Image (tube, rainbow, N blue to C red):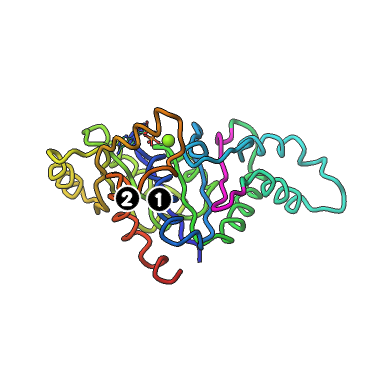
Amino acid sequence: MTFTVAISGKGGTGKTMLAALLVIYLLRKTNSELKILVVDADPNQNLDKVLGAKVDKTVGDLREELLNIKDKIPSGISKKQYFEYMIRNIVYEGEYFDLLAMGRPEGPGCYCYVNHLLRMILDKISEEYDVVIMDTEAGLEHLSRRTTRDVDALIIITDPTSRGIITAERIRKLVQELETKVHKIYAVGNRVTSSVSKKIEEELVRRGFEVLGLIPEDPYIQELDLEGKPFTEIPDNSPAYKAIESIADKLFSHIINTA
Ligand SMILES: Nc1ncnc2c1ncn2[C@@H]1O[C@H](COP(=O)(O)OP(=O)(O)O)[C@@H](O)[C@H]1O
Ligand SMILES: [Mg+2]
């Protein structure tokens, strides 16, 4: 069974940082025993860079191509087989994890047929992994268009600002209108200093969120970001990594125990 985690939240609140550090946690905790698929579902993709991977082509790019060639597929191969071959070709296959970038959702046009096939193939590919970690954006475009599979846990991240928290609530509301099923929703506070930690936790609980944890401001992250280094270089004793360890211990308890 694949365990799918999606991360959403207002822009700039730390979605990509959290997605990357959850992947790094899994690699460190399990000695890379799990099959991990990282999905970058933010059109402003940068998860590959912070994980030291490189993606050349997105599902969005491929969707455009397939729309143009869908009636000119070589004979002897079904459209589904051909599409599947093309998608597998754009998955970055790393030593420790694979990565797929969704790119832009479709523009106007008749994508129903292409999308239907893409969805089936992406579901099939996802099922080959133990864990799927997805970095999304606040609009949840890929989830709302059902271009990604159902989600076991959605983590909505917020910084300690009222705008962040209001966006978190908006996202939770949006989820209720989605066709994609989301089984569990959690909140995480990021860049939280000790003076506001109690307040933000209380505020999130008051608004009905289950708080999975709070992440402090971390100079290691700023340093890596400034130097353009991947987050895989983060030390075990970095304050943010330690907070994410405790978040991930809860989130993945059922997987880590049986891995
Ligand atoms: N806990 C933290 N401590 C220090 N810097 C952080 C922390 N969380 C995020 N950042 C920095 O804040 C910026 C935005 O984070 P990012 O993960 O890219 O946000 P998002 O993906 O939600 O737009 C990045 O430069 C990131 O390195
Ligand atoms: Mg991001």
Which numbered circle lies on residue 138? none
Q: Which residue is mark 1?
A: 22
Image side of residue 198 versus residue 247, left or right: left
**Residue type, label 2:** Ile
In the rendering, at what x and y percent does residue 246 appear? 29, 56
In the rendering, at what x and y percent does residue 158 appear? 28, 39
- Badge 1 crowding class, 10 Å Cα cut-off, few under 14, some 14 to 19, many 20 or more, is many
Residue nearest the observer in this picture, 50 or 14: 50
Q: Residue sitting at 57 percent across and 61 percent down?
A: 127
Q: Is residue 101 above or below residue 26?
A: above
Determine contact: label 1, label 2, CB under 8 Å: yes
Q: Quadrant of residue 129?
A: bottom right
Q: Is residue 104 above or below residue 24?
A: above
Ligand 1 shows up in the quarter that is top left
Q: Which residue is mark 2?
A: 244
Residue nearest the observer in this picture, 153 or 170: 153
